[in-house]
Image (cartoon, rainbow, N blue to C red):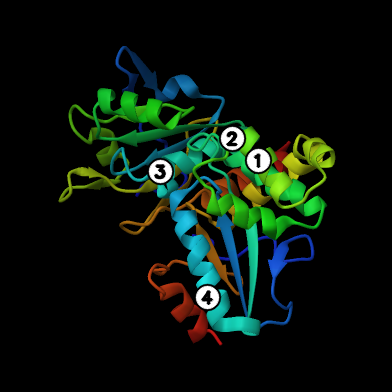
């Protein structure tokens, strides 16, 4: 995992079959990066289905969520449609896992990203990170706490 | 990650059993979630096994995008609570998880003996939808990562809950 205070490595990945998202184009917003092993885990325990519901809480902090896995853009499209997801799923597909590797969140053995979370501030600096133990959905509480803390610090400065 | 319940159980909660019971089980659940349907009968088993030693609290955690009827069902249970029939409606919803359309909800209201006009008014009110959202937000902050999620005496329970495992764990906490 990259340390807090590190500049977030830039990337450009497909979020739909014909569109890409570039991290550095999103400056001015807080970014939540959620690396996860793969699409299609059962809905009731699915991390992305949970975040889909907590988006409204993230938005209060001017934060944009990006899900990232090594699944293809076509899998993401079908998964997103099936679950009514309202945030982009990025395809870290070719070269496989390159972005996950640059964020030190890749599981070489399994060939997927790990379950890793990062919160990046408006200037593109990593402000919080968390690597979840294997098989555990980390929930949204850590992200919410990190976002609140960032807002508090910013209010104190201004 | 955070493993403790926020906010604590209070008189605002729907609960069964004594406030000074040795063990308090809190469930965050969704009325349209199949696993929660399984949990419904396992919680009943636990209540039967532990009797007065256990208190049970239910909070709403509807995964609305995945389960289109979950929010309305949660609101129906809260609206029933306004007429003192939360648990009757809660049970009715879990026993009829496959049928949760607005028409179904009205007929359950009738079956549990609610004043239908009052129910209709309450189910669409801001107070009720705020209550469901507040439950959800509290759950998200407490580390609820899916449904059902259980907290035992304020700590998130990550263990197995199927096939009597929940009852066994609760018993071990006495």
Q: Please name the residue shown 41% across and 69% down the image.
A: B159
Categorize mark 3 by other alpha carbons within 10 Å: few (<14), some (14-19), many (20+). some
**Disc 2 + disc 1, Cβ < 8 Å:** yes
Identify the chain of the residue marked 3, using the numbered disc in the image: A
Tell me how far mark 4 sits from mark 2, CA to CA.
30 Å
Q: Nearer the viewer, mark 4 or mark 2?
A: 2
Q: Residue under circle 2?
A: B101
Q: Quadrant of the C terminus of chain A?
A: top right
Identify the chain of the residue marked 2, using the numbered disc in the image: B
Tell me if A134 is positioned left or right of B142 in this view.
left
Of helix, strand and loop, which one carries label 2? Answer: loop
**Disc 4 + disc 3, Cβ < 8 Å:** no
In this rendering, the answer to whether B166 lies above or below B78 is below
Q: Please name the residue shown 82% across and 36% down the image.
A: B121
Q: Residue under circle 1?
A: B105
Q: Residue under circle 4?
A: B46
Tell me how far mark 2 sits from mark 1, CA to CA.
6 Å
Of helix, strand and loop, which one carries label 3? Answer: helix
Asked if marks 1 and 4 fall on the same chain, the answer is yes
Tell me how far mark 1 sits from mark 4, CA to CA.
27 Å
Q: Residue under circle 3?
A: A43
Q: Please name the residue shown 48% across and 62% down the image.
A: B39
Q: Nearer the viewer, mark 1 or mark 4?
A: 1
Tell me if A127 is positioned left or right of A136 in this view.
right
Of helix, strand and loop, which one carries label 4? Answer: helix
Identify the chain of the residue marked 1, using the numbered disc in the image: B
Q: Nearer the viewer, mark 3 or mark 1?
A: 1
Q: Is residue B174 visible?
A: yes
Identify the chain of the residue marked 4, using the numbered disc in the image: B
């Amino acid at each position: 995992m990259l340390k807090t205070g590190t500049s977030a490595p830039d990337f450009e990945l497909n979020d739909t079959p014909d569109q890409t998202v570039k991290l550095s184009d999103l400056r001015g917003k807080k970014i939540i990066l959620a690396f996860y092993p793969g699409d299609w885990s059962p809905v009731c325990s699915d991390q992305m289905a949970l975040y889909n519901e907590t988006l409204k809480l993230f938005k209060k902090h001017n934060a944009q969520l990006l899900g990232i896995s090594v699944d293809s853009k076509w899998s993401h499209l079908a998964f997103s449609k099936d679950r009514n997801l309202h945030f982009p799923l990025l395809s870290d597909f070719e070269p496989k896992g390159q972005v996950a590797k640059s964020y030190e969140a890749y599981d070489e053995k399994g060939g997927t990203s790990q379950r890793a979370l990062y919160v990046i501030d408006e200037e593109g600096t990593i402000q919080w990170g968390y690597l979840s133990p294997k098989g555990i959905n980390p929930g949204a509480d850590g992200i919410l706490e990190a976002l609140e803390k960032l807002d508090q610090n910013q209010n104190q400065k201004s | 990650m955070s493993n403790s319940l926020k906010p604590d159980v209070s008189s605002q909660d729907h609960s069964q059993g004594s406030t000074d019971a040795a063990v308090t089980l809190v469930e965050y659940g969704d009325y349209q979630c199949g696993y929660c349907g399984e949990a419904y009968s396992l919680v009943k088993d636990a209540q039967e096994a532990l009797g007065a030693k256990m208190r049970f609290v239910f909070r709403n955690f509807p995964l609305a995008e995945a389960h289109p009827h979950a929010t309305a069902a949660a609101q129906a249970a809260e609206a029933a609570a306004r007429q003192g029939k939360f648990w009757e409606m809660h049970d009715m919803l879990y026993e009829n998880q496959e049928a949760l359309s607005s028409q179904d909800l009205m007929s359950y209201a009738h079956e549990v003996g609610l004043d239908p006009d009052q129910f209709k008014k309450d189910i669409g009110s801001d107070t009720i939808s705020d209550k469901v959202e507040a439950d959800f937000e509290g759950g998200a902050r407490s580390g609820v990562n899916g449904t059902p999620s259980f907290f035992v005496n304020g700590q998130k329970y990550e263990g197995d809950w199927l096939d009597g495992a929940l009852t066994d764990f609760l018993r071990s906490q006495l």
